[in-house]
Amino acid sequence: MDSATDKLIGQTLTLTGHFDSPVRVEAVRPLAAGFELRVRTPDGHLEETAVSADEFSQLQNQVRPISEGDTAADPDLVRLLVESAHVTVEARKEDGFDPVWLRNAVTEPIEESGAEVEG
């Protein structure tokens, strides 16, 4: 891949004529007469579309520079995180625990009082 295609990855772009709303580019693959883009729609679906070389050059104008603090999450790691949380909630339901307890256990701050926790 060259720098022109790498710059699109992770960008949220408007692909007029392809999608109704802005999409996030996840992969770019060169084709004989253009490029294939793998994009994530706002509702989370992964879609693919082909754009001509002219459309691709116009997309380059939408690219915003990524600041040093901006980093994209690895989609595979995010998927694993979501799946593991789902499995945990399902296991808690089967054991008779309330899933609200799990949410509160994750979101409530832990007090550091120095006292030992009985278990």
Image: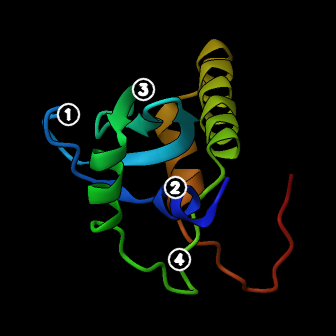
Q: Nearer the viewer, mark 1 or mark 4?
A: 1
In this rendered view, identify the residue nearer to me: 51 or 53.
53
Q: Nearer the viewer, mark 4 or mark 3?
A: 3
Question: Residue 85 location, x and y as percent?
Answer: 63, 35
Question: Residue 37 location, x and y as percent?
Answer: 45, 37
Q: Which mark is residue 70?
A: 4
Question: Residue 107 location, x and y as percent?
Answer: 51, 60
80 versus 119 height, above or below: above
Q: CA distance from mark 2 to mark 1?
A: 17 Å
Q: CA distance from mark 4 to mark 2?
A: 13 Å
Q: Which one is earlier in the sequence, the residue at label 2 or at label 1? A: 2
Do tag 2 and tag 3 residues touch (Cβ < 8 Å)? no
The residue labelled by disc 1 is 19
Residue extending farthest to the front is 33
Amino acid on which the number 3 mark rests in the picture: Glu
Q: Which one is earlier in the sequence, the residue at label 4 or at label 2? A: 2
The residue labelled by disc 2 is 9
On screen, residue 45 versus residue 98, left or right, reads left
Secondary-structure class at tag 1: loop
Q: Which mark is residue 48?
A: 3
Secondary-structure class at tag 2: loop
Secondary-structure class at tag 4: loop
Q: Quadrant of residue 113?
A: bottom right
Kindly identify the residue that appears in the image at 86 percent across and 73 percent down: 116
Give the total of numbered labels: 4
Do tag 2 and tag 1 residues touch (Cβ < 8 Å)? no
